[in-house]
Amino acid sequence: MSKPGQQVISRLRQMILSGELPAGQRLAEIPTSEELGVSRTPVRIAFRTLEQEGLLTKLPRRGYIVRQVTQEEITGSIEVRGVLEGLAARQAAEIGLSDAHKEELIYLLKQGDALFLNGTIDEQDLEQYHDINKRFHQIIITASHNPAIEEALSRNEHLPFASISALAFDKNNLSREYRRFNFAHMQHHAAVDAIIHGQGSRAEAIMREHANATLGYAKIFCEQEGNENEMQVIGRTSL
């Protein structure tokens, strides 16, 4: 996907997370493309992607509507991803990494180190981290040599915030985002160390915590007082 296309997806995802696009709001290509100052093509692709992520629902005739997402959906999808990626890490550790996978994981860690070296990040850094993060997780899944894990993850990715690609950040608070993503990167280091040394149980625990830590970041505000199952704003998403 082109960089402008990825930026439109990220922008719309963040607008949903922040509540700028509240649950129940209808979305159409032309007004959305005009608001974002882009052509209709990246908006069309973004709508389809966000539908697959469980954030939008396609209307029978034309357009989409922002879905109401419950806390149970978020918790469940993230926990399932943690279990599956934990299993992948354990099996990768037990089987042993190929030289190619080991070299690439170490290379990705060095790329991440360079991003966080100066103690600050910008939007371009976070876009680069998105690519590093996605490839990192894919290598571990592939290194498990268990196609059932990848199949199960592909099904789970249709639930809200379960996809590793569903990365969002608050560009108005980049100092906080630096701490969040730097912590995630340190977990990447720990996971690779465990896998390289054949420590299956440790690798599994780290990857499960890596996913489940997302729940600790989430800030959930109920739309109606006393209703704990309705979400209006989530300030954090999957790492």
Image: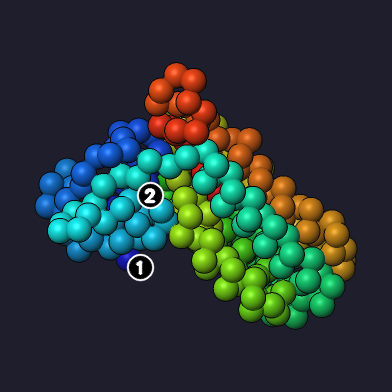
Per the model, the C-alpha gap separating discs 1 and 2 is: 19 Å
Amino acid type at mark 1: Met
x and y, in percent, of residue 215 in the image:
61, 39
Which residue is at a point 64% across and 50% down the rendered structure image? 79
Q: Residue at x 79, y 66 (%)?
A: 90
- Residue at left offset 30%, top offset 44%: 66
- The residue that mark 2 highlights is 55
124 lies left or right of 189: left
Tell me where residue 5 appears, x and y as whole percent.
Answer: 30, 60
What's the amino acid at mark 2?
Leu
Name the quarter where the N terminus is drawn: bottom left
Measuring from the top left, give residue 142's x and y in whole percent.
Answer: 65, 75
Mark earlier in primary sequence (1, 2): 1
Front-most of 73 and 163?
A: 73
Q: Which mark is residue 29?
A: none
Can the viewer see residue 158?
yes
Residue under numbered circle 1: 1
Compared with 192, 223 (above or below) is above
